[in-house]
Image (cartoon, grey):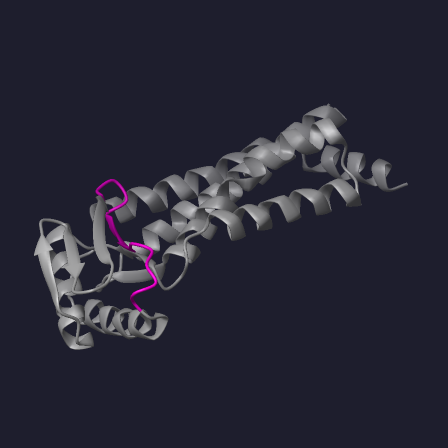
Amino acid sequence: MLASWQLELYLQIAVVAVPVAVYFLVLGLLNSQKRPQMLSGRMDFSLLIASLAPLFAIPALDWLGTNLLTISACVAAVAATMAALSPRSYRSWVVYNISMNKALRCVGRALDLAGFRYSRREDRFYLEGGPNIHLASFPILRNVSVHISPTDKCRRAALRRFEAELARTIGAVEVTASPMAVSFVLVATAMIVAPLILLADHVPEMVRILTDLVK
């Protein structure tokens, strides 16, 4: 027999595991394309927060109680976290399925096409009379982050022009699918299938318990 607390536990596992699984699936798809995929820093950060939010929301709801008010408060807290901590979309980007060397060449090419004068030192570009652009690689996820330092000397329109040229330059690069893409897809599949296996043998009992809860 499946007790109500067991059903609640299984559902909590599913609620936590599925968003993380979807995140890994997205990473797998991004790293399996024939060309690098560029996301804004805000979108990349939002995907991460959305995948991890249930991990923190469920204990909070257990402590505060599950009702419309507490659920709304958790959703508002997640939205506020995204708004407060996510980078500005025109100052930060994340490029998936690309090496550091190719990313550096793409950034330099985009700056040339956008009409910027700059000097380069290792993984940093110094714009003449403006901000600097720093690149950071995360090999496990096979991505490169591109960050522009905050400054008032470079107008937003100029940064948008650089963003457009960077997207165009990256879109012309040909790459092979990353081996990590298969790993991400397999992890995502396992995280989705595991909760279903836990619940598969108890479907009639789940229906009964849910029916009793509705009555």
Give x and y (percent) for residue 118: 12, 64
At x 21% / y 67%, what residue is drawn? 170
Residue 117 x/y as whole percent: 13, 69
Taking the magenta stretch, the answer to whether it contains residue 139 is yes
Q: Residue at x 42, y 56 (%)?
A: 42
| Figure check: 112 above or below 21 | below
Asked whether residue 200 is in view, the answer is no
Determine whether, in the image, residue 151 is placed left or right of residue 81.
Answer: left
Asked whether 55 or 1 is in front, the reply is: 55
Where residue 146 appears, x then y in whole percent? 26, 55
Residue closest to the far right: 215
201 vs 25, left or right, is: right
Quadrant of the drawing holding the N terminus: top right
Whether residue 127 sits left or right of residue 68 in the image: it is: left
The answer to which image quadrant residue 39 occupies is bottom left
> Does the magenta-highlighted stretch encompass residue 86?
no
Residue sitting at 47 percent across and 47 percent down?
A: 85
Please tell me which residue is depicted at 22% across the width and 52% down the height of the picture: 134
Give the residues in magenta.
138-154
Viewer-proximal residue among 205 and 136: 136
